[in-house]
Amino acid sequence: MIKGSVLDLAKRRRSIRKFRAEPVPLEDIVYAVETALEAPSGANRQPWRFVLISDPGLKSMIRRICEASEKKLHSSPGLPAGLENGLLREALLGRRSS
């Protein structure tokens, strides 16, 4: 039965906190994105966008901004500052969002 299979899969899920140094093959990444594109969404709008980033410096900058936003999220009742002020968008696009 599919219902039991999904529950079993959810129970076996684990978070990964340490990653290997070698890069993931591009064909594996493309397969994962193609699979994600099939996920259902409200009114089939599929409002997400995927960006593949391989530059270590840019990934590090994004991580710092996201971690700072997450820290603010857990310490305040409102949206994290990175989302409210567009800091991540500014870092990625080089301009402040309106």
Image (cartoon, rainbow, N blue to C red):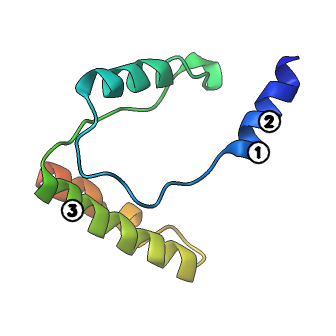
Q: Are marks 1 and 2 in contact (CB under 8 Å)?
A: yes
| Element class at badge 1 | helix
Dot 2, crowdedness within 10 Å: few (<14), some or many (≥20)? few
Dot 3, crowdedness within 10 Å: few (<14), some or many (≥20)? few
Residue depicted at 76% across the width and 45% down the height:
11
Q: Of marks 3 and 1, which one's residue comes earlier in the chain?
A: 1
The image shows residue 97 at horizontal and vertical percentages of 24, 54
Residue depicted at 37% across the width and 32% down the height:
49
Residue depicted at 23% across the width and 45% down the height:
22
Position of 29 with respect to 78 (left or right) is left
Q: Is residue 68 above or below residue 16?
A: below
In whole angstroms, how far apart are the C-alphas of marks 3 and 2? 35 Å
What is the quadrant of residue 69 in the picture? bottom left
Circle 2: residue type: Asp
What is the quadrant of residue 2 in the picture? top right
Circle 1: residue type: Lys
| Element class at badge 3 | helix
Circle 3: residue type: Ser
**The one of 87 and 8 positioned closer to us in this rendering:** 8
Identify the disc placed on residue 60: 3
Q: Which residue is mark 2?
A: 8
| Element class at badge 2 | helix
